[in-house]
Image (cartoon, rainbow, N blue to C red):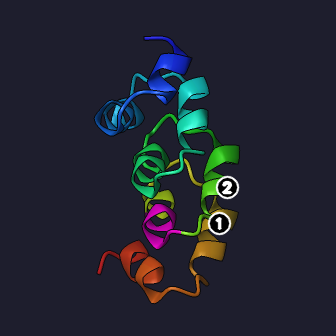
Amino acid sequence: MDKNEILNSDYDVRVSVAENPSTSVDVLTELAKDRDWYIRSYAACNPNMLVDVLTELSKDSDYIVRCLVARNPNTPTGVLIELSKDEDDRVVSRMVGK
């Protein structure tokens, strides 16, 4: 499938591609903009996600996306510090593994 086919696919295909560690950075970057928070959350925890995109996702409206950004090993320290001050206590709790 090419990028446009993936982005216009059904929910299950987009989830599968977002969580796949072999997905190209180009496709991951687009999936990080998906209208569905669940797709964005899978993209946020993909180990190939770009630092710039993780930084943007750290400001996502959905707390689960922000939690998964915090758990991505590529998330910069500065972003983690900002997430540790998140207004939603669930983000901070998940950062410390509770």
Q: Nearer the viewer, residue 41 or 7?
A: 7
Q: Main secondary structure of the magenta part?
A: helix
Q: Residue at x 52, y 22 (%)?
A: 24
Answer with left or right where residue 84 lies relative to residue 65.
Answer: right
Q: How many marks?
A: 2
Q: Nearer the viewer, residue 14 or 64?
A: 14
Q: Nearer the viewer, residue 56 or 71?
A: 56
Is residue 21 found inside the magenta-colored segment of the image?
no
Q: Quadrant of the C terminus?
A: bottom left
Residue indicated by mark 1: 59
Identify the amino acid type marked 1: Lys
Is residue 65 found inside the magenta-colored segment of the image?
yes
Residue indicated by mark 2: 55
Q: Residue at x 58, y 87 (%)?
A: 87
Labels 2 and 1 touching (C-beta < 8 A) = yes
Residue located farthest toward the top when viewing the structure as drawn: 1
